[in-house]
Image: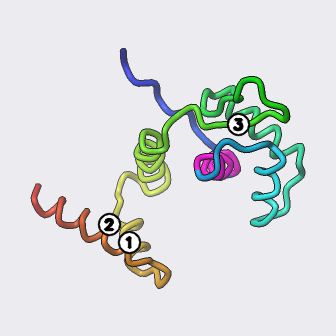
Amino acid sequence: MPKKEMPTLGELEARVLQLIWDRQPCTERQVWELVQQERPAARTTVLKTIQRLEAKGLLARQENSAPILWRAAVEQRRALPELVQRFVDGVLGGSAEPLVAYLAGQKKLSDRDVAALQKIAEKLAEQ
């Protein structure tokens, strides 16, 4: 069976999906409170975003829970590569160079981030 293509995500959809991946299962209220920590958003906006993600097949309701608990319906490790590729293709014109340059210039990179970048560079050098 061919793999299902990732639907296009807006900025808030991507952030809500990330929050749910990080903390699942969670209620709509919990997601709204997390979004509120980052930027103002109406609770109805967050609920509508969750509903759109469910319609796109990316979130699922946990059965027999009150209040409703939400879980990701797609694994993060499967979704992220395609989302990053779309960003590179659509925003960066197909070249990852601006992304790599941006990451290299960040002062906030953790030791883990630096190690991951080094591993990627080694893998590319082997090709």
At 72% from the left and 33% from the top, the residue drawn is 52
Q: Mark 3: which amino acid? A: Trp
Of mark 2 and mark 3, the one earlier in the sequence is 3
| Image spot of residue 7 (x, y percent) | 56, 33
Q: Secondary structure at mark 1?
A: helix
The quadrant of the picture occupied by the N terminus is: top left
Mark 2 = which residue?
116
Q: Is residue 23 left or right of residue 68?
A: left
The span shown in magenta is: 12-21
Q: Is residue 62 left or right of residue 68?
A: left
Residue 49's place in the image compared with 19, above or below, is: above
**Few, some or many residues within 10 Å of mark 2 (<14, 14–19, 20+):** few
**Residue 112 shows which numbered tag?**
1
Of mark 1 and mark 3, the one earlier in the sequence is 3
Q: Mark 2: which amino acid? A: Ala
| Image spot of residue 101 (x, y percent) | 37, 73
Q: Mark 1: which amino acid? A: Arg
Q: Quadrant of residue 13?
A: top right
Q: Secondary structure at mark 2?
A: helix
Mark 3 = which residue?
70
Disc 1 versus disc 3: distance between alpha carbons?
Answer: 29 Å
**Residue 52 shows which numbered tag?**
none
The quadrant of the picture occupied by the C terminus is: bottom left
Taking depth in this image into account, of 66 and 118 the one nearest to the observer is 66
Taking depth in this image into account, of 59 and 70 the one nearest to the observer is 70
